[in-house]
Image (cartoon, rainbow, N blue to C red):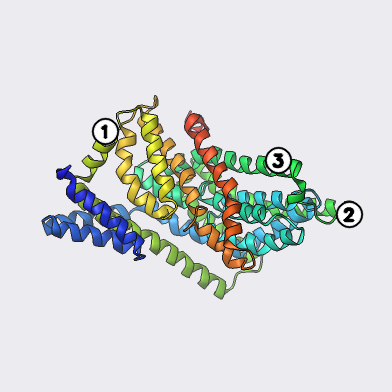
């Protein structure tokens, strides 16, 4: 173990740095440079990291999709599309037991396939749907857990920024990841619906029906719902449809989506200079955060590999001496535990480069390209839990910020069933890999 003293010390320093509360991007790069000096790595070797930053990040055309998709999501949220859709769904389903809950779940799927911006989705539904659910005397654990969980579907259902980052890290097609994530994303949403149906059937007092609506108003609500669905459906078709049909790359589709969201905001008369300025500023902040973490992770990984970190990780998994599925279980368990303390960006940029060579070398009875695609989507399902698991689940604090009258303990208890459903979806995906592989394979024929 003495030959792995430096990489082990780097990992220990990384953990201490992260828990110190210092920005992760600076922790990663600082740990890398510090241990390069301590271990006597030639300073000239750091130029390798500079060249990788330039060629792998700053001039990487694939990463252009990140700010475009972020801008698309922010503009769509400000266009009022989700707000109108939620009102139409509430008018149509509110009179049924669990009607508001089903409306929130549907909005979560539509927003996920349209924006992928977790904070915007959770805050929007928390501000609009939670008061109506409280007025209808919903169990607060169900309403808060559902809003938080439905808002995180955007990290899995394409267009997903997480899948873009994973595709770049694993050097696999982002288009294939987008197509492969559709099945697992809809499966997870389906599990949410099954859970809500079970609650509505066996415990209707936890999700009581709202005020009855007149038949005429229900008919009008159905027509209005169809109208309100038209815009997001067209946007989804423009983005995902062009990727699936092979007309556009993910980057080109992101540009189409950004232009479409801008047009929707203009048509909705929600586009003004202040809105555009705010959207551009938030897009820049989000993109800069991701890029800076990628730069720090690049410096860290360059020094970590130079000091034998790759061999240490491979030997550690070889020492397990068991089959590929047990190794996969260990990796997934590690990612799940890290999700309690880190967000998906840090996990994707620090852990994935370390474990990807291990996974690629395992025999799951399928080609290596399919193994990595399946692994990436399973990771996305797993890392989705990081938004919900305390103490640092971002979705929980987004919701708490717009619902100060709901205790954080209630929100924590409310997300437990949905985290279990996410883990169930992960287990189903691991047992049945074709859930994520069938669509890319079918379209490749």
Determine whether, in the image, residue 15 is placed left or right of residue 276.
left
Precedes in sequence: disc 3 or disc 1: 3
Residue receiving disc 3: 198
In the image, residue 37 sits, relative to residue 330, either above or below, namely below
Give residue 264's position: percent from left, percent from top.
62, 61
Q: Earlier in the sequence, mark 3 or mark 2?
A: 3
Decide: is 259 above or below 326: below
Q: Is residue 274 above or below residue 347?
A: below
Instruction: Say which residue appears at 33% left-offset and 30% top-offset.
Output: 362
Residue 221 in sight in this render: yes
Q: Residue 328 in the image: x percent, y percent?
A: 39, 35
Q: Quadrant of residue 171?
A: top left
Q: Quadrant of the N terminus?
A: top left
- What separation in Å lies between label 2 and label 1 (alpha carbons)? 67 Å
Q: Is residue 202 left or right of residue 271?
A: right
Q: Is residue 441 visible?
A: no
The picture places residue 361, in percent across and down from the top left corner, at 30, 32
- Label drawn at residue 214: 2
Considering the numbered disc 3 on the image, is that residue within a helix, a strand or a loop? helix
Q: Nearer the viewer, residue 128 or 225?
A: 128
């Amino acid at each position: 173990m003495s030959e792995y003293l430096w990489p082990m010390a780097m990992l220990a320093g990384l953990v201490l740095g992260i828990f110190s509360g210092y920005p992760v991007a600076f922790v990663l790069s600082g740990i890398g440079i510090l241990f390069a000096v301590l271990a006597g790595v030639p300073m000239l070797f750091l130029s390798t990291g500079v060249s990788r930053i330039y060629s792998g990040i700053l001039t990487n055309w694939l990463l252009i999709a990140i700010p475009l998709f972020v801008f698309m999501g922010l503009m769509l949220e400000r266009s009022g599309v989700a707000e109108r859709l939620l009102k139409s769904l509430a008018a149509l389903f509110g009179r049924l037991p669990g009607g508001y809950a089903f409306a929130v779940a549907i909005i979560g799927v539509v927003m996920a396939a349209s924006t992928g911006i977790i904070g915007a989705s959770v805050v929007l539904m928390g501000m609009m749907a939670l008061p109506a659910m409280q007025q209808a005397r919903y169990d607060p654990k169900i309403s808060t857990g559902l809003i938080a969980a439905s808002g995180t579907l955007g990290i899995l259902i394409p267009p997903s920024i997480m899948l873009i980052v994973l595709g770049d890290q694993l050097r696999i097609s982002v288009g294939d990841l987008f197509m492969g994530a559709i099945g697992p994303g809809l499966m997870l949403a389906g599990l949410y619906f099954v859970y809500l149906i079970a609650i509505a059937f066996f415990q209707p007092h936890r999700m009581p029906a709202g005020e009855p609506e007149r038949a005429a108003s229900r008919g009008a609500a159905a027509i209005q719902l169809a109208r309100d669905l038209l815009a997001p459906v067209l946007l989804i078709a423009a983005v995902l449809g062009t990727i699936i049909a092979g007309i556009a790359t993910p980057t080109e589709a992101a540009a189409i989506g950004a232009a479409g969201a801008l047009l929707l905001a203009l048509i909705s008369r929600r586009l003004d200079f202040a809105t555009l300025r705010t959207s551009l500023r938030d897009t820049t902040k989000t993109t800069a955060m991701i890029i800076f973490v990628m730069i720090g992770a690049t410096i860290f990984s360059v020094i970590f590999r130079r000091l034998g970190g790759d061999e240490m990780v491979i030997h550690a998994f070889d020492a397990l001496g068991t089959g590929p599925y047990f190794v996969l279980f260990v990796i997934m368990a590690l990612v799940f535990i890290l999700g309690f303390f880190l967000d998906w960006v840090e996990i994707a940029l620090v852990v994935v480069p370390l474990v990807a060579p291990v996974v690629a070398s395992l025999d799951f009875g399928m080609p290596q390209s399919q193994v990595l695609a399946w692994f990436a989507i399973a990771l996305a399902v797993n890392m989705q839990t990081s938004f919900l698991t305390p103490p640092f689940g971002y979705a929980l604090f987004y919701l708490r910020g717009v619902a100060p009258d709901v205790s954080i303990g209630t929100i924590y208890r409310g997300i437990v069933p949905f985290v279990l459903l996410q883990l169930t979806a992960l287990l189903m995906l691991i047992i049945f890999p074709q859930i994520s592989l069938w669509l890319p394979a079918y379209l490749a024929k």
